[in-house]
Amino acid sequence: MANSKTMAYRSLIRPILFRMDPERAHHLALGALRFASALAPLRSFLAALYRPKVAGMSQEIWGLHFEHPVGLAAGFDKDARVVPALQSLGFAFVEVGAISSQARPGNPRPRIFRLPADRALINRMGLPNDGARVIASRLEQLSRPSVPIFANIVKTADLEGDAATMAADYVETLEAVLPWVDGFTVNISCPATPNLRTLGQQDAMFELLKTLGEARDRGVRDCGGARRPLILKVSPDVDDAEAAAIVAASKEGLLDGLVLTNSTTTRPSSLAAPSSVTSQKGGLSGQPLFAIALSRVRHFAAATEGQIPIIAVGGISNAGQARAMLDAGASLVEVLTAFVYEGPGLVKSIATGLESGGWRPMRPDFCD
């Protein structure tokens, strides 16, 4: 059941935001969070309102501490501008990006479309971001975050070339941000980026992960600190060969975890939105993705025999759906589209709902 803060957002704030173009509304929200990020008293106020006070759900995964299992997926804070405010809103971890080696503006607008009746979005943003060096300097200026920060890394959108060329581009990004983050989610699954899915083929994937692993290990030796996990972000639309390659890579020790899943290019027949919206090109996220993502979590948890941590994302908007993902084999969950629809009270609602429902991590110390 929605709490009072979520109800206030739904009835007062969301109607105003939803009268705006989706991207303009997003930038307005980011502007408010940038203001909060710069003011410690305001961050403390947000934390008092929204940070969940829960017990018994902490975990140590990849040598990192997670107070509860709910984090923010990549795509909201693309340029790492509002990390302090996001911590105050109660996220147990934050994924920034996607980040590429070179700054890119993304695809032409409009490139985000709301499906309110389906509690969903379609986006074809095309990975706009400020580039790895600028984002690294921004991360460097932060006070040490109190929650784990992951960088979602991706190839520069318009880069063409063979697998080795693309891997070198990923490495440039990894090396730039490595000192300032706790781990990496390796994005090979954005549906709005040309040629990215070719990295799902086994030879290309293995070359990419081996190259990134070597660069990560060099970087850790140079700058010190703990070994940063490489976590592969997987498309829900993987075919059997791609799924088998991902499982093989996990068994070869080339990756440390999975994010399941990215947005989908499919359009479920149950969508209520008009065809003028559902026919838009791009990735569908939100409530219609939940069943697909849940099935992927179950599949990969079984196929990897529970040996690597899974972060579940896709259509999660309440404690019951989060619990389903965790019971299916995930160790952590992420939200994004539901954050747009439910507002800043979402994290507290899910975390406290999990606590009151008696959820406890099955493997509270899931380390390498």
Image (cartoon, grey):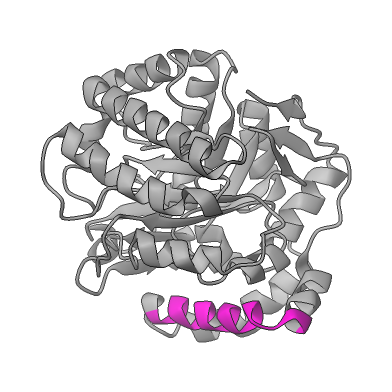
Residue 161 location (% of width, % of height): 10, 41
Seen in the picture, residue 45 relative to 125 is either above or below; the reply is: below
Seen in the picture, residue 162 relative to 9 is either above or below; the reply is: above
Query: Can residue 112 be seen in the rendering of this structure?
Result: yes
Looking at the rendering, the stretch of residues picked out in magenta corresponds to 24-41
Q: If the image is split into quadrants, where does the C terminus sit? A: top right
Rendered residue at 81%/40% (across/down): 57
Rendered residue at 40%/47% (across/down): 175
Q: Horizontally, is 56 left or right of 37 in the view? A: right
Q: If the image is split into quadrants, where does the N terminus sit? A: bottom right
Q: Nearer the viewer, residue 71 or 119?
A: 71
Rendered residue at 55%/39% (across/down): 312
Q: Horizontally, is 255 left or right of 317 in the view? A: left
Residue 285 location (% of width, % of height): 42, 53
Q: Nearer the viewer, residue 260 or 338?
A: 260
Secondary structure mostly seen in the magenta stretch: helix
Rendered residue at 75%/59% (across/down): 348
Q: Is residue 37 magenta?
A: yes
Seen in the picture, residue 180 relative to 206 is either above or below; the reply is: below
Residue 341 location (% of width, % of height): 55, 67
Farthest front residue in view: 222
